[in-house]
Amino acid sequence: MKSKSALRLCLSLFICFALLIGAQSFLPNILTLYPEWFGILLDFAAMFIPIVLLHVLMPRKENFRPKLKPSHISAEMLGFTLCMALGLSFIRFDIEYLVYRITGASEINLSFSLLTIPFGNSVSFFAILAAILVPALIEEFYLRGYIQTFLSEYMSTRQVIGLITCISAMLYGSLPALPGGIIFAFGMSWLTFVFGSFWYAVIAHAVSSALFLFLNWLLGKFMVYGILRFLPALCIIFALLFFYIALRLAERLTLRQAFRKLHYVQHSDYSFTKFASNAAALAFLFVFIAKAVIGII
């Protein structure tokens, strides 16, 4: 990996993070009947602008563009993706509940997108559908389609998945959201790798968003009736059920050799050092610490 390419890639991540921070500060001040549409638009812009910058800054010789068409798709692969998405989402809910109890927060943080999208009093079906599909598409398109595809050309699989998992979780810009974000981001990165396409992460993200919207509605309606006394236990049961179904589907997929194997890239450690030690990467890390740890941003 060339130093300039690593710098430009990290610069796009830094700009994405800066746009998300700005949008988080701007959204609460919006006085409108439809704040969800502004949230969807700002989340889209925070991913789309770095993608445009990558196309402008990156040289044509660099292979970083995502494969828009999946190489192969089957009912078992879709079923495995859905089960993994639901299982990970239920586990993430329990993690968010644990953070909620430990920190003593006023409410559980069930953020299904990098930018928390607020909903007004009157929400249409199309707004809900857009809140599910748009963040899932644009976030996975940028993080898994562009960043993970680029890193896979220069780093080994374990390094890529670990790195993109940490980056994705840090983009939430919050320490309480970090544990659940790591679990979710790892699942999306792993699905992208094993099936060789970011579209499976898009599907899993959309399913997770729909489930989190339902859980948010459930908590809003029945929180006063003590639903949190048994909902975390139910989520564990559902997670085990979906993981079991995913395991059975994985047996069939393994026999058909549908899963990609781990790959090793020569000079992978050198590329990792180039990516993690450039100025834009350090700036991204410092801003995250200032935002999530110190709280001065």
Image: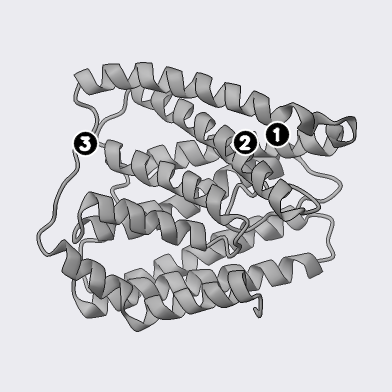
Q: Earlier in the sequence, mark 2 or mark 3?
A: 2
Q: Position of residue 46 (x, y in %)?
A: 54, 66
Q: Report helix, strand or loop for mark 2.
A: helix
Mark 2 or 3: the one toward you: 3
- The residue beneath circle 2 is 210
Q: Residues within 10 Å of mark 3 (few under 14, many from 20)?
A: few
Q: Position of residue 51 (x, y in %)?
A: 41, 65
Q: Residue at x 62, y 76 (%)?
A: 294
Q: Residue at x 56, y 35 (%)?
A: 91
Q: Which color scheme did the rendering employ for the protein?
A: one colour
Mark carried by residue 214: 1
Residue 178 drawn above or below residue 243: below
Q: Residue at x 16, y 46 (%)?
A: 263
**Which quadrant: the C terminus?**
bottom right
User: Is the Cβ of the residue at disc 2 closer than 8 Å to that at disc 3?
Assistant: no
Q: CA distance from mark 1 to mark 2?
A: 6 Å
Residue 36 drawn above or below residue 84: below
Closest to the observer, 67 or 204? 204
Answer with left or right where residue 65 lies relative to residue 30.
Answer: left
Mark carried by residue 260: 3
Q: Position of residue 280 (x, y in %)?
A: 39, 80
Q: Position of residue 243 (x, y in %)?
A: 46, 24
Asked if residue 57 can be seen in this view, the reply is no
User: Is the Cβ of the residue at disc 1 closer than 8 Å to that at disc 2?
Assistant: yes
Picture quadrant where residue 257 is located: top left
